[in-house]
Image (cartoon, coloured by chain):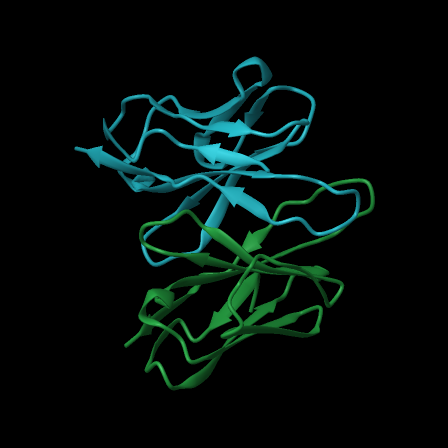
């Protein structure tokens, strides 16, 4: 079965500084990978996804992520964070069974705090 | 309404009550999902509906009963819940396409408190 590890429960970054959130997955084949963001009291919003092709993917709000098969990682980055980026970030993996609906397996999340 | 909507947004119920959570997707999708988000656990998949048929029940206790009357609506019927069932319940939808995977879109969730 697949699993996702987000090793950092909390991360504090100064506004304007760069950000990297770590995600490692465990899955036998090429996974479908996602980063979602959740603001307090809200549902999950998709930031970006990796299905295949270019291993560096661009997302919304200036985020990007890089898929590294050799490290089983899919880390999220942003060159300069804004106070509005403070939220909970979730990495997720999906399997694809060829036409069926497959649920997502999530990591425990990383809580991002922005210091002024 | 756009996207995925969920009602109610907040629900407080006693252990002997029966209540239902409602989810509606306005995206024309054909698959819907229920997830549970507890304070101390990762988001957990509960149920999957694929073209209105339940295709996955992730070992969920029978006190949770899903219903999908059509591809736009999904319900979660609750009865005889326990305090540990207090959580944020998230609904999601996606479009199934043969040969490819499409991302899931989430609703804002229902915050459930069981007293």
Vertically, is B18 above or below B110? below
Image coordinates of residue A39 in percent, x first then y, are: 35, 50
Farthest-out residue, top: A70
Image coordinates of residue B107 in percent, x first then y, are: 50, 60
Residue at figure coordinates x 61%, y 19% from the top left: A55
Farthest-out residue, left: A116
Residue at figure coordinates x 30%, y 35% from the top left: A9
Vertically, is A63 above or below A105? above
Q: Quadrant of the C terminus of chain B?
A: bottom left
Q: Nearer the viewer, residue A38 or B42?
A: B42
Q: Nearer the viewer, residue A116 or B24?
A: B24
Q: Is residue B75 left or right of residue A113?
A: right
Residue at figure coordinates x 45%, y 30% from the top left: A62
Vertically, is A93 above or below B35? above
Farthest-out residue, right: B98
Q: Is residue B96 left or right of residue B68?
A: right
Image coordinates of residue A54 in percent, x first then y, are: 65, 19
Picture quadrant where residue A88 is located: top left
Q: Which chain is cyan?
A: A
Counting the numbered discs, the total is: 0
Q: Which chain is green?
A: B
Vertically, is A84 above or below A55? below
Image coordinates of residue A97 in percent, x first then y, are: 75, 43
Q: Is residue A92 left or right of residue B42?
A: right
Q: Quadrant of the N terminus of chain B?
A: bottom right
């Amino acid at each position: 079965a697949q699993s996702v590890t987000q090793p950092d429960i909390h991360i504090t970054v100064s506004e304007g500084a760069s950000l990297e959130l770590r995600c490692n997955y465990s899955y036998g084949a090429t996974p479908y990978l996602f980063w979602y963001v959740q603001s307090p009291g809200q549902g999950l919003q998709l930031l970006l996804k990796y299905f295949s092709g270019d291993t560096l993917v661009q997302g919304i709000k200036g985020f990007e992520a890089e898929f590294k098969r050799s490290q089983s990682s899919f880390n999220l980055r942003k060159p300069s964070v804004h106070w509005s980026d403070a939220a909970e970030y979730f990495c997720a993996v999906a399997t694809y069974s060829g036409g069926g609906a497959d649920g997502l397996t999530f990591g425990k999340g990383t809580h991002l705090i922005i210091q002024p | 309404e756009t996207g995925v909507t969920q009602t109610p947004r907040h629900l407080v119920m006693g252990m002997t009550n029966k209540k239902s959570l409602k989810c509606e997707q306005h995206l024309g999708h054909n698959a819907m999902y229920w997830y549970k988000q507890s304070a101390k656990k990762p988001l957990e998949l509960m149920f999957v509906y694929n073209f209105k048929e339940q295709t996955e029940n992730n070992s969920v206790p029978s006190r949770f009963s899903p219903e999908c009357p059509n591809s736009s609506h999904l319900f979660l019927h609750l009865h005889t819940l326990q305090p540990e069932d207090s959580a944020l319940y998230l609904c999601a939808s996606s479009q199934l396409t043969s040969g490819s995977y499409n991302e899931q879109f989430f609703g804002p969730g229902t915050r459930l408190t069981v007293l």
